[in-house]
Image (cartoon, grey):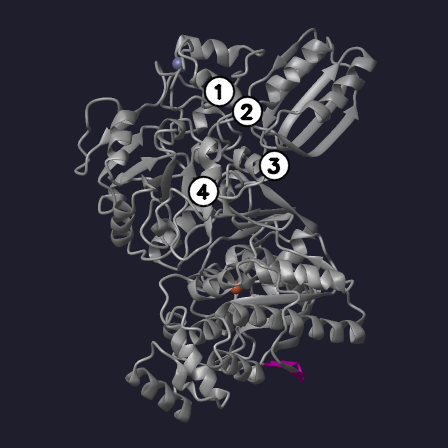
Amino acid sequence: MKKIRINGIVQGVGFRPFVYKLAIEEKLQGFVLNDTNGVKIEIEGNLQAIERFEKRIKLEAPPAALIDYYKSEQFPDAGYTEFNIKLSAKTDGSTRISPDLAVCNDCMNEFNDPGDPRYQYAFINCTNCGPRYSIIQETPYDRPVTSMKSFAMCEYCESEYKDPLNRRFHAQPIACPVCGPQLSFFDHEMNPVPGDPIDNCNNNLKSGKIVGIKGIGGFHIACDATNSKVINELRSRKNRPDKPFAVMVHLNAIKQIVNVSDEQIELLKSAAAPILILPKKVKSPLASNVAPNNPNIGVFLPYAPHHFQIVTEQLPFVIMTSGNMRDEPIAIDKKVLSGLCDCFLSHNRPILNRSDDSIILPADQKNIVLRRSRGIVPSQMKLPFNIIPTMGTGAELKLSFAITKNEDLYLSPYLGNSGSKETMDFYKETLTKYKKWFRLEPELIACDLQPDFATTRFAEQSKLPIVKVQHHHAHVAAIMAEHQLNEKVIGISFDGTGFGTDKNIWGGEILIADYDNFERAYHLEYMPLPSGDAAIKHPIRIAFAYLKAAGINPDFLTGISEIEQKIITKQLENNFNIFQTSSMGRLFDCVAAMLNLYPAITFEAQSAMALEFLCNYESILNEKSYSFKIENGKIKIFQMLNEIVADIKSNIPHKTIAKRFHKTILDFTLEALIKIRAESGLNKIVLSGGVMQNKIILCGLDEILSKNDFEVFLPERIPPNDGSIAVGQVMVANKKYKKENE
Ligand code: ZN
Ligand code: ZN
Ligand code: FE
């Protein structure tokens, strides 16, 4: 007899019926069961058949399964006479939970078949698809510990559920119109509206209304993406004047609005069904205020069955934005959205665990995850080595936490974009669940150096030994861990804001780093940031202060009032409420404001993005760059600012200035790296930080550094932004703590 242990994503993905079918086909005896350690199999019979059985497990595993552990041991036979699927057992290990999976083709065929009992049924699913993460309460994954527990199966569903040869064998969320959850429609006052909920929803969308739609991970706020009037109304209700909205699009119409490759369509159609950021078509049926002044748009395909009834050939472009107030967690209760929506399409399958849609940015041949959420969480990540159980609390923007156990790291979904009470409540709620599901008990806690972050206070109140980790060291360590690196590397962290060890605001950093420690090899020279955060929302003030500091007359700037000028001048003279910053994000803000792009911004990185978009993704590698000086570890930019002003005054097109500016960043980075390599012999480069969301910088550095024989590591499976900072925190904290306690 062989005893086999399998772990990975093996529960809720049809693994046991798959094993059962194999055993029956190979005429073997024994059993398979799910427990908190994954899948356990005991198998006996013909030796060659057992060999084939084991091979086929790995080769033919169900599409949504992911095996990351497989162990098989020989034991004396137990004398089994048949093969069974045994009930789930509890042990004290931990297993994975599958992410939520987009509806599969087999289910969609039934959904579209008028003869099928689940014809047009919004909650159709099978072992290959459907909700998982969002409906689970406990592990091991079984119907009584999901939000399906209140729906008793009808005879038809039960017969499928119990038939080992059926696609729905042990499909925990199995349901049909007779026994399962139902959609319903509500008006503005939350009164139920009679009639077909889907018809009601579609009529409202078509007549220019804003509809709250309950989906898999939470509510979306939906409206017709070709109707600029309703989009303006949504923008004003959400207090979101400019930030782009994502559009759910009908597959047959996608090429009308974006340029998309066949591979990208496959990614959109995958079980994770992410939002992809793709270049807009110039002539497009979309209203221009879906993503104003932006050459890209986030698009995704319907992934829940009822999405297919809403996003149809009659209404192929629907804005589907996260149902929340600005920067707060996604809502699962329609009451939260009462001020935002005219009516609601809801359902009675509770969402136990919220998640936003995941976002992926295709950049050349690579796909960069910008937001790790539905369809991806709660999958874990393998670390390069075993570490003490540690929690990284994250930063503040793009909030998410990480906890480790042995070599496994669990990164939470995106939890919100602020340290607000709502976000921190969601944070604590998710943390409690992660600890319970995956049997995580951190013995060490890591946080940012920034004393004002809610996540720093959270760490301080935890009573665990605490290690504070410099923000950009954490950025670099995160991407090192993603690539299983465990050696000294050159880490580039081009970022917005991070608290430095000298209490200044860092963000244009080239570090020599391993997990233990880092050396700040080069950084952008310090520039004055008047009144910190207030200036970040008013890039024109940054430009004014930077130019003053560089001894350049800022007279040509437009969009700054006399009073602002007076106040900042005084602040600079008296060094009052002036912060010193080496931030790359602020340098983008400064140059964008010099080009009069956005004197004031309404969402993070708006003006930096505008500067990127000016280049129009044309190659900048042959562009000339501005002058710079690298001295005593500092990258000096006064000359560049001077030359930009000269270009502006001689009416050089803004597009050219933007390209030269980007090229300058590539050039000074390359020069600094060549110096470091000459002195240290280091050749591995890790790219990190929020500025790496800029495709011209990310792809440009990748190309120019590779050409110069550097080995370059990009953020791919975890975000370059603060969404992965917790990963770096746990890695650094561990090494530091171990060293101090040796
Ligand atoms: Zn299915
Ligand atoms: Zn049923
Ligand atoms: Fe950051």
Distance Cα–Cα, label 1 vs label 3: 33 Å
Image quarter for ligand 2: top left
Q: Are marks 1 and 2 in contact (CB under 8 Å)?
A: yes
Q: Residues within 10 Å of mark 2 (few under 14, many from 20)?
A: many
The answer to whether residue 178 is left or right of residue 731 is left
Q: Position of residue 308 (x, y in %)?
A: 40, 28
Residue reaching furthest to the bottom: 573
From which residue to which does the magenta span run?
630-636
Name the amino acid, label 4: Ile
Where residue 107 is drawn, which disc sits there?
1
Q: Secondary structure at mark 4?
A: helix
Report the residue marked by disc 4: 257
Where residue 93 is drawn, which disc sits there?
3
Residue under the image location 50 percent in, 36 percent down: 273
Cβ at disc 4 under 8 Å from ligand 1: no
Name the amino acid, label 2: Asn
Pick the residue in front: 93 or 687: 687
Q: Secondary structure at mark 2?
A: loop
Precedes in sequence: disc 1 or disc 2 = 1
Which numbered mark, 4 or 1, is in the foreground of this view? 4
Name the amino acid, label 3: Gly
Report the residue marked by disc 2: 128
Give the mark count.
4
Which numbered mark, 2 or 3, is in the foreground of this view? 2
Q: Position of residue 537 (x, y in %)?
A: 37, 69
Cβ at disc 1 under 8 Å from ligand 1: yes
Distance Cα–Cα, label 1 vs label 2: 9 Å
